[in-house]
């Protein structure tokens, strides 16, 4: 298993180009199942999860051409679901990546049948899909659970309905959007997730001929269509990658220009950074982040659905707060078990205590390099951040977590003066 070795203590300076959003690209790829024409996606990141989704769609009979997977920049993909050969998403693929469940809505809507393995638990909590299933049932789907699989049927097609999500769910909203665009009549999705990735999917569905009102709000109104057609769509920039590199500039006291980034998608993070003493400004074609020479101040943070502070940035901001003056309380409200990075950060000298859903971070003057273990995608990046700021050498084990979502991480950081390399085993 590959490892990443970092020599810490260098301020990052330079320019990083942010890639396409993995979490937008995954549902967009699944949306190709909704039409027999070609869906052409640009700005697709070369991340492990994208390859996993491509593998799953390939199993279903989707023809995929493209260059995502080779070369230095974000790639393009052409997906053609003209002749599907299967409607089953097998356990091995769903287990690897929970977002595989996003094929459920489109398969059911266009083919009247889907068999998708239940995702099961994952490192950051139980993460059930009950809300996806209850909402699909309201559209008339017959759903049974059978030997670890979701067996969903809509022999006479889906019918529009008024769905109120009891809690906002990103994947649930995306699955329902993809089901509703081919349902008969009108569907209203209330308390829908407003994440930019949901809006990106909605815009692509509109380009494919869907009629969706309320994009960007918590109420989506969809008029079902008989069929959708092919389209071309460019994936939005990755706001989590953007914010992760913004924290890299802050934690090393450096200055980074992040090209392609959209400030309006990271406002909650920019706000916390500003309160801590970091300058984040919009610039031509992206954002500029300046950490400065002074010690940062501790800031309280609570994760919330968009436009609140993203749970996918909780681990990274904790690494920053570990080195700030004073204490900060970081509260996780989205997932119940998302503090696995805490013991690893403490091994590097941080002073963090977890009490239920909150972590109290007491800032320390410095961190020291250590051998640490990545536990999930975003937690892994928090260890890279700690390693960039720490004195001495840090080795992050289990790098495959990072590869699921950050493309060319070492190259991007090395280009800005970091000393970081991959050790291949
Ligand atoms: C997506 C993102 C993930 C991010 C998360 C929250 C992708 C591929 N992944 O995950 O990176 O951390 O949004 O912003 O886009 N829940 C239920 N029942 C359900 C569905 C969700 O109880 O049927 C709960 C979850 O356990 C969680 C909360 O709702 O506590 C929000 O989860 P959700 O928004 O669905 O996250 P994902 O779509 O899985």
Image (spheres, rainbow, N blue to C red):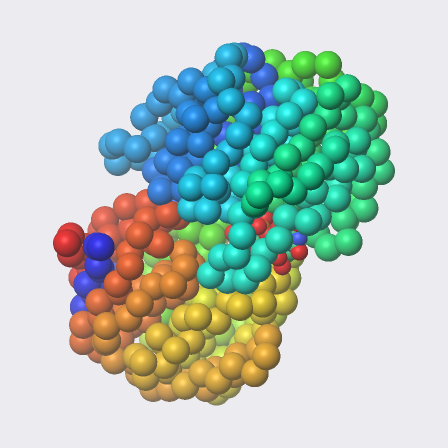
> Against 220, is 4 above or below?
below
Which percent across, then down, holds residue 76? 39, 26
Q: Residue at x 48, y 71 (%)?
A: 339
- Residue with the most extreme front position: 147
> Against 315, is 64 above or below?
above
Q: Is residue 354 left or right of residue 386?
A: right
Which percent across, then down, holds residue 319? 40, 72
Which percent across, then down, holds residue 112? 67, 22
Res. 178 image quadrant: top right
Q: Residue at x 37, y 36 (%)?
A: 51
Q: Nearer the viewer, residue 257 or 166?
A: 166
> Against 308, is 253 above or below?
below
Q: Residue at x 56, y 45 (%)?
A: 148
What count of labels does the image hold? 0
Q: Nearer the viewer, residue 285 or 323?
A: 323
The C terminus is located in which quarter? Answer: bottom left
Q: Is residue 277 left or right of residue 329?
A: left
Res. 402 image quadrant: bottom left
The N terminus is located in which quarter? Answer: bottom left
Q: Is residue 172 left or right of residue 6?
A: right
Which percent across, then down, holds residue 422? 18, 55
Q: Nearer the viewer, residue 325 or 44?
A: 44
Q: Residue at x 31, y 67 (%)?
A: 373
Q: Is residue 106 left or right of residue 323?
A: right
> Against 236, is 408 above or below?
below
Q: Answer whether residue 41 is visible to the viewer in this image.
A: no
Q: Answer whether residue 330 is visible to the viewer in this image.
A: yes
């Amino acid at each position: 298993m590959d490892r990443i070795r970092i020599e810490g203590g260098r301020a990052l300076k330079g320019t990083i180009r942010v890639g396409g959003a993995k979490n937008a690209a995954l549902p967009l790829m699944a949306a190709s199942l909704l039409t027999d024409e070609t869906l052409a996606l640009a700005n697709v990141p070369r991340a492990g999860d994208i390859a996993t989704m491509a593998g799953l769609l390939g199993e279903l009979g989707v023809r995929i051409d493209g260059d995502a997977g080779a070369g230095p920049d974000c790639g393009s993909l052409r997906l053609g679901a003209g002749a599907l050969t299967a409607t089953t998403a097998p356990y091995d693929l769903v287990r690897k990546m929970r977002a595989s469940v996003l094929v459920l809505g489109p398969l059911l809507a266009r083919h009247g049948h889907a068999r998708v393995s239940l995702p099961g638990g994952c490192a950051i909590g139980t993460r059930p899909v009950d809300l996806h299933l209850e909402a699909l049932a309201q559209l008339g789907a017959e759903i049974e659970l059978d030997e670890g699989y979701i067996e969903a049927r809509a022999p006479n097609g889906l019918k529009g309905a008024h769905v109120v999500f009891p809690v906002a769910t990103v994947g649930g909203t995306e699955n329902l959007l993809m089901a509703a665009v081919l349902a008969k009549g009108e569907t209203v999705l209330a308390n829908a997730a407003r994440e930019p990735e949901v809006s990106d999917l909605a815009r692509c569905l509109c380009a494919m001929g869907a009629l969706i009102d309320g994009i960007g709000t918590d109420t989506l109104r969809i008029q079902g269509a008989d069929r959708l057609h092919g389209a071309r769509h460019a994936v939005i920039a990755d706001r989590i990658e953007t914010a992760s590199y913004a924290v890299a500039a802050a934690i090393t006291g450096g200055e980074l220009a992040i090209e392609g980034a959209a400030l309006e998608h990271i406002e909650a993070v920019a706000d916390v950074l500003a309160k801590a003493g970091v300058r984040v400004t919009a610039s031509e074609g992206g954002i500029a982040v300046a950490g400065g020479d002074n010690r940062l101040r501790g800031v309280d943070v609570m994760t919330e659905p968009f436009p609140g502070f993203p749970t996918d940035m909780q681990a990274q901001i904790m690494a920053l707060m570990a080195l700030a003056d004073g204490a900060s309380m970081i509260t996780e409200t989205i997932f119940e078990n998302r503090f696995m990075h805490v013991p690893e950060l403490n091994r590097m000298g941080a002073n963090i205590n977890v009490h239920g859903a909150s972590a109290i971070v007491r800032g320390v003057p410095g961190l020291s390099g250590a051998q640490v273990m990545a536990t999930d995608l975003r937690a892994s990046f928090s260890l890279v951040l700690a390693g960039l700021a720490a004195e001495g050498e840090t080795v992050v084990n289990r790098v495959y977590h990072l590869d699921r979502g950050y493309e060319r991480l070492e190259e991007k950081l090395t280009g800005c003066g970091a000393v970081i390399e991959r050790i291949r085993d």
